[in-house]
Image (cartoon, rainbow, N blue to C red):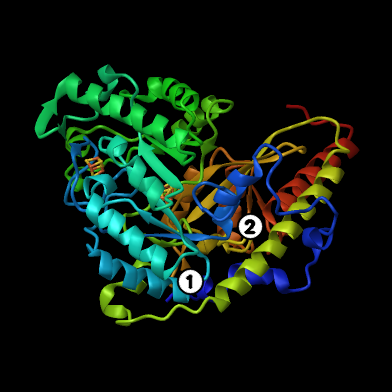
C-alpha cells in the first residue's frame, strides 16, 4: 500500500525545520483564505477539491466508484469494454460495484487515506444513464461519511431530468463533457445517442445532445452548482473549434474548462483508434490552452483518471482497495483526517508567505522574462521527488512577478529497479524539450548531462522546498547574475 499517502509524508515534511525558501515564510499576507478573484463561498466549495482547485490537488485526493456501467450515447473515442474516456484513460475494465459495495470501499479508503475529500462517480459509462445506482450511492455515502464532497461527471444528455435530484443530494460539483457546440462538428464525434426511447444518428443526434447539454448547464448554474466542462481535443475535428466552446460555456456560467487530449490507440478498439485519428501532442495541447487564457477559467492539472481511480491526482491506489482486500465492515476514525487538515492549513499559509517573500526579491529585477520550469513533485506543493522516480513533471511559468501552473507532462520514470534505463532518457528529454529548467530533489550524472546537452538547466538546490517560492528564487538568481554581467534579461 502506498505509504506516502497514508503516512502524510509528502506534506508532513513541512514539520521539519525549514531552511531556504520556507524559512522566509511567516509574512502576514501568507494565508489560506479565498484568492482575491473568488467569492468566499465558492472558495469553501473548491479549496479541498483536487480538480476544481490547482492548489488543492497538491494536498487532497479523490476517489471514483464504478457504479455506473451503462451509457446512453456513443462517442468515437470510447469502447464500451473500457472505462469512460470522459473522465478516464481507456484501460482495463473496472471492478463494477453495487452501491453497497461502493460505500464499503469508500469507507475503507477514507479510513486509510486522510487526504480523501471528494467522491466522484464518473462511469465507467455515464453517471446519469444509471441514476438509481448513482443517487443511491450518494445517499448512502452522505449518511456514512458526511464530510466528503460529492461530484459527478456526465455527457449531459440526461442532465436536465436530474438537476433537482442533484440538488437534493447536495452534489456541489458536476462535470459535463462538451466537445462541440456546433452539431456540424459534433456529428464527427458522436455517431448516435439514445433519447426518448429512440436511437438518433448524424447531425440530429449531435443537435439534441448539444441542446440538452446547454439546458443542463444553465439549470445547474441557476441552482448554484459549480460546473466544469471537459472538452476532448481531437486534432482536425474540433481543435479549430475550442475557442468557440470556451466562449459559449463561459457565457453560460461554467466555472472551469478542462481541455483534455484525445487518447487514441488501435489496441483500445475505438472508432478513432481503428481509423488512425491521432491525439494532440503535449505541445499542441499547450498552444491551444494558451490561446484560451482570458476566457473561461482553465483547468490544466487534469490527469484523465480512471473511473475507479483512488488517491492524489496522478497516482492510483485503486489496486490496494479491491473488494477482496478490504474488511466487511471498515471503521472510519475521523482523528487522522482532522490532524491532516491542520497540517494542510499551516502548509498553505507557509507556502503563500514563502511565495510572497520570494516575489519581493524577484521584483528587484526590472525586466520580465518568462521561463518555463518542470518540477518533480510527489505532492504537498514541494520539490520533493528524485528525477528518476518522476512519472510526470508539473510545468510552471515564472516571470519574476507570478508563477503560473501550465500543465503536466507524463513520462516513464527513468529509474527502474534502482538503475537508470538509458533508453527511457531520450523520450523524457523529448517531452521536456520546451522547458528552460528542471527542478528536482535529486538527479544522477547521466540524466543531468543529457538534459544539459538539450539546453535544459538542472536545478537541485531547492530540494523539499516550496515550488513557487523556489521557482521565483531561481528566476531571480538567473536574472541577477545576468545583470551583474551587464546584460538585462528581456521578454
Ligand atoms: Fe472525479 Fe471528475 Fe469529480 Fe474530479 S476527476 S468526477 S471532477 S472528482 Fe479530475 Fe480526473 Fe481530470 Fe476528471 S483529474 S479526469 S477532472
Ligand atoms: Fe463512452 Fe463516456 Fe462517451 Fe458514454 S459518454 S460513449 S461511456 S466516453
Q: Secondary structure at mark 1?
A: loop
Q: Quadrant of residue 405?
A: top right
Q: Is residue 463 left or right of residue 480?
A: left
Q: Which residue is mark 2?
A: 381
Disc 2 crowd rating (10 Å Cα; few below 14, some 14-19, many 20+) is: many
Q: Which residue is mark 1?
A: 113
Q: In the rendered image, which quarter contains the N terminus?
A: bottom left
Picture coordinates of residue 265 (x, y %)? 25, 43
Residue at position x 68%, y 62% from top? 345
Decide: few, some or many residues near mark 1? Use Cα within 10 Å; few <14, some 14-19, many ≥20: many
Q: Earlier in the sequence, mark 1 or mark 2?
A: 1
Query: Is ligand 1 less than 8 Å from the beta carbon at label 2?
Result: no
- Residue at image position (48%, 71%) is 113
- Residue 375 visible to an observer of this rendering: no
Numbered badge on residue 22: none
- Residue 18 percent location from the top left of the image: 78, 68
Amino acid at each position: 500500500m502506498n505509504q506516502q499517502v497514508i503516512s502524510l509524508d509528502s506534506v508532513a515534511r513541512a514539520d521539519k525545520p525549514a531552511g531556504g525558501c520556507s524559512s522566509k515564510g511567516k509574512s502576514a499576507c501568507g494565508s489560506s483564505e479565498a484568492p482575491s478573484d473568488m467569492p468566499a463561498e465558492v472558495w469553501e466549495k473548491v479549496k479541498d477539491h483536487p480538480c476544481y482547485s490547482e492548489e488543492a490537488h497538491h494536498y487532497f485526493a479523490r476517489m471514483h466508484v464504478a457504479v455506473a456501467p451503462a451509457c446512453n450515447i456513443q462517442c468515437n473515442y470510447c469502447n464500451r469494454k473500457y472505462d469512460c474516456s470522459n473522465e478516464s484513460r481507456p484501460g482495463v475494465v473496472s471492478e463494477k460495484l453495487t452501491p453497497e459495495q461502493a460505500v464499503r470501499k469508500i469507507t475503507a479508503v477514507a479510513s486509510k487515506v486522510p487526504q480523501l475529500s471528494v467522491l466522484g462517480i464518473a462511469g465507467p459509462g455515464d453517471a446519469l444513464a444509471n441514476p438509481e445506482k448513482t443517487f443511491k450511492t450518494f445517499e448512502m455515502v452522505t449518511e456514512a461519511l458526511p464530510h466528503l464532497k460529492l461530484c459527478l461527471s456526465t455527457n449531459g444528455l440526461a442532465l436536465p431530468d436530474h438537476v433537482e435530484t442533484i440538488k437534493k443530494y447536495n452534489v456541489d460539483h458536476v462535470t459535463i463533457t462538451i466537445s462541440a457546440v456546433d452539431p456540424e462538428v459534433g456529428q464527427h464525434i458522436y455517431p448516435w445517442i439514445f433519447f426518448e426511447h429512440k436511437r438518433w444518428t448524424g447531425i440530429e443526434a449531435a443537435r439534441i445532445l448539444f441542446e440538452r447539454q446547454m439546458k443542463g448547464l444553465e439549470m445547474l448554474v441557476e441552482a448554484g452548482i459549480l460546473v466544469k466542462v471537459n472538452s476532448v481535443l481531437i486534432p482536425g475535428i474540433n481543435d479549430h473549434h475550442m475557442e468557440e466552446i470556451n466562449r459559449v460555456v463561459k457565457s453560460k456560467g461554467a466555472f472551469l474548462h478542462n481541455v483534455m487530449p484525445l487518447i487514441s490507440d488501435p489496441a483500445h478498439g475505438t472508432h478513432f483508434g481503428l481509423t488512425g485519428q491521432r491525439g494532440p501532442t503535449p505541445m499542441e495541447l499547450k498552444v491551444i490552452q494558451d490561446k484560451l487564457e482570458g476566457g473561461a477559467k482553465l483547468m490544466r492539472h487534469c490527469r484523465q483518471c480512471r473511473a475507479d481511480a483512488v488517491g492524489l491526482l496522478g497516482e492510483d491506489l485503486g489496486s490496494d482497495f479491491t473488494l477482496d482486500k478490504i474488511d466487511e465492515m471498515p471503521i472510519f476514525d475521523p482523528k487522522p483526517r482532522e490532524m491532516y487538515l491542520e497540517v494542510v492549513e499551516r502548509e498553505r499559509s507557509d507556502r503563500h508567505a514563502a511565495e510572497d517573500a520570494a516575489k519581493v526579491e524577484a521584483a528587484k529585477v526590472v525586466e520580465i522574462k518568462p521561463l518555463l520550469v518542470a518540477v518533480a513533485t510527489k505532492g504537498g506543493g514541494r520539490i520533493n521527488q528524485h528525477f528518476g522516480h518522476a512519472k510526470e513533471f508539473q510545468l510552471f511559468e515564472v516571470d519574476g512577478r507570478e508563477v503560473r501552473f501550465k500543465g503536466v507532462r507524463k513520462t516513464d520514470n527513468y529509474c527502474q529497479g534502482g538503475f537508470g534505463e538509458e533508453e527511457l532518457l531520450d523520450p523524457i528529454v523529448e517531452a521536456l524539450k520546451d522547458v528552460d529548467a528542471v527542478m528536482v530533489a535529486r538527479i544522477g550524472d547521466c540524466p543531468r548531462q543529457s538534459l544539459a546537452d538539450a539546453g535544459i538547466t538542472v536545478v537541485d538546490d531547492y530540494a523539499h522546498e516550496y515550488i513557487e517560492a523556489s521557482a521565483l528564487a531561481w528566476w531571480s538568481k538567473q536574472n541577477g547574475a545576468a545583470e551583474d554581467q551587464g546584460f538585462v534579461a528581456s521578454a
